[in-house]
Each structure stands twice: as structure tokens, then as C-alpha cells.
Amino acid sequence: MNFSASKQFVKPPQRGIFPLDHEAECKPYMEKYLECLKEERNKHHKCRDLSKEYLQCRMDRQLMANEDLDKMGFSKEAEVKNAEEYDKSKEREGYVAGKHIDKPMKWWFQRS
């Protein structure tokens, strides 16, 4: 066998990849957030404050890099207000997206 003597390069983790919480320091925050998601039927904008608390806990304990929470989508401008769930009424009546287009589609190289 011939092993290469070249130097191996180790890449740092990508943004968004951070150490696991092995000591369960932020587990109560995580559990509150997940419980909220369950109660609100996965409407994450209703559990926004709990998500913010969980991320702040991770930053305080160096489980992730310190970031400005406003830049992470927690600013007042990014707050979701009066969100309504789509009721899918068109689909129940038989609507299919794109079905109303009768002409054949051309490939990109066929278009002039």
C-alpha cells in the first residue's frame, strides 16, 4: 500500500453546525419550545419568544457562536402578525396548478 505523505486539511464546521448540548444545559428551553410547537400545530411564529430564549441559552453557554438575534430573524420588523392558515379550498374543488395551460411547453433552447 502506498499512503500519501500529503498534508490533510481539516475544514471548520459550516455555519449552523454547532456542538451538541451534552450536559443538557438548554434542554428545558428546548422542551418548552417543542411543546409550544406541538400545542400550536407547528405554527412556529407563535413560539417565537421560546425559540429566541433557546438560542440565547446556547449562545450564553458557548454551544453556538454569538450572533445578533435581530439578524437571525428576531427583530420587530420580522415578526409575523395576523398570519392565516391557507384553507386549500381551491384544491378541494378540484383545482390543479398549471392544468389551465393548453399550449405545449418549449425547452429553453427551443424558445426564441
Image (cartoon, helix red, strand yellow):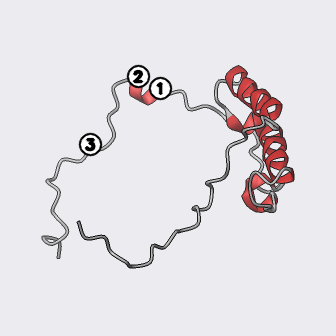
**Which of these two is toward me, 81 or 28?**
28
Distance, label 1 to label 2, CA atoms, is: 5 Å
* Mark number, residue 100: 3
Residue sitting at x 76%, y 51%: 63
Image: 33 above or below 65: above
1 sits left or right of 69 in the view: left
Q: Are marks 2 and 3 in contact (CB under 8 Å)?
A: no
Distance, label 1 to label 3, CA atoms, is: 17 Å
Image: 86 above or below 68: above
Q: Which residue is mark 2?
A: 92
The three-letter amino acid code for the residue at tag 1 is: Ser
Q: Are marks 1 and 2 in contact (CB under 8 Å)?
A: yes
Residue 2 position in % (x across, y down): 25, 70
* Mark number, residue 89: 1
Image: 20 above or below 16: above
The three-letter amino acid code for the residue at tag 3 is: His
* Mark number, residue 59: none
* SS at mark 2 in the image: helix
Pointer 2 or 3: first along the chain? 2
61 sits left or right of 42 in the view: right
The three-letter amino acid code for the residue at tag 2 is: Arg
Residue 19 position in % (x across, y down): 67, 49
Residue 35 position in % (x across, y down): 74, 23
Image: 88 above or below 2: above
* SS at mark 3 in the image: loop
Which residue occupies the extreme bottom position in the image? 6
